[in-house]
Image: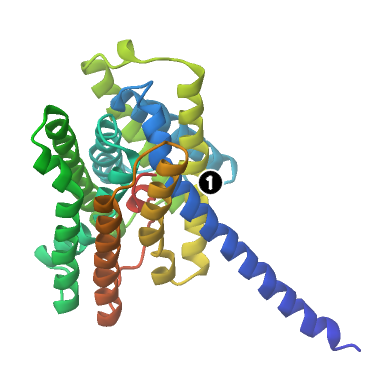
Amino acid sequence: MATLPQVAAPQGQAESHRLRVGISFGLVYFFWGSTYLAILIAVRHFPAPVLGTLRFLIAGSLMLGWCAFSGRKVRISSGDFFRLLLVGVLLLVGGNTVLAWAEESINSGLAAMIVAVVPIWIAMIEALFGGDRLNPLGWAGLLLGIGGLFVLLWPDIASGSAIGRKDLLASLGLMLGSLSWALGSVPSRRFQLRVGAFAATGWEMTLAGAVNCLLALSFGGFHRADWSRSGWLAVGYLVTFGSLVGFTAYIWLLEHVPTPKVATYAYVNPVVAVFLGWLLGGERIDRYILFGMVVIIAAVILVTSSKLRSGKLPVHKQASPCEAGAD
């Protein structure tokens, strides 16, 4: 009888742990996948730099305030300041603000599929700048990813109409934004900072919000903003569930689950985004979106698998929410 509590306690702890893991994966999968639709709604009210200003200044301030309140270190050196500024600009201005700009023209599902190739760009950058070289499996994934992008863009390429050209320009701009994400993700994983992941991301958000504010002031974005309730609700959703809840779940998973399993968000988020865009946003899913989605997700799986087989999948020393995409 005395041994029963000793057996039951570990079992209960294991079940509780599995439940927390499942909930955390659900939060990351759903909320980071849903941010594409939330951004689409938000840019109907706020120009992209204004949206970036509001979202990241609010989320960054809240995260830094929580870190200070909980006793975490938030003070950074001048060197850390410039490192975090670089990463924040590449991820959250060059990446996220460009995503918001693109969604002023294209639907959220297409945007999610273009952003889904970020892991492929990261693999290319690491291979070009002295990192892990792509093996044949990785090269196959790279070529397949390029083919998937071509499938997604083919309707706009073939149409030749003014709307088609505008959508194509937005899609190509988003591809550059995805490259900016990749460029920011590589140093983010390698920088040695004096603060933890939460404080570092709080600073990245705050600094990126300040840069977005300068852009909005320079281009008159605040004068064109629609300060209506629905716009603020979209911003509130992005701040609360995209930046704070999703990121907290992501960090917890990195601390309790092997990194390759956490990386599965790269396969799931685009599917969630396409589905929600169809279900709630009235977006059309045609054969190009479906086939392109299958091809790109297969390409990302191939590239990730090539790193697993080489035993060199990067470990996140400092996780950043925008490495996941639209968050």
**Up-down relation of residue 51 to residue 113 (above or below):** above
Residue 110: x percent and y percent?
Answer: 28, 45
For the image, the number of numbered tags is: 1
User: Looking at the image, which residue is at 25% across and 13% down?
Assistant: 220
Q: Is residue 21 left or right of residue 282?
A: right
Q: Amino acid at mark 1?
A: Val
Residue 112: x percent and y percent?
Answer: 32, 47
Q: Quadrant of residue 66?
A: top right
Pick whichever, 254 or 307, lies toward us: 307
Quadrant holding the C terminus: top left
Q: Quadrant of residue 2?
A: bottom right
Q: Is residue 248 left or right of residue 169?
A: right
**Up-down relation of residue 301 to residue 60 (above or below):** below
Tell me if I can see residue 289 in this picture: yes
Residue 116: x percent and y percent?
Answer: 29, 54
User: Looking at the image, which residue is at 55% across and 58% down?
Assistant: 24
For label 1, the residue is: 245
**Up-down relation of residue 266 to residue 17 (above or below):** above
Q: How is colour applied across the structure in the image? A: rainbow
Residue at the extreme top: 223
Q: Is residue 255 left or right of residue 274?
A: right
User: Looking at the image, which residue is at 41% across and 30% down?
Assistant: 41
User: Looking at the image, which residue is at 15% across and 38% down?
Assistant: 168
Pick whichever, 264 or 222, lies toward us: 264
Residue at the extreme right: 1
Q: Quadrant of residue 206?
A: top left
Pick whichever, 123 or 289, lies toward us: 289
Q: Is residue 34 left or right of residue 96?
A: right
Quadrant holding the N terminus: bottom right
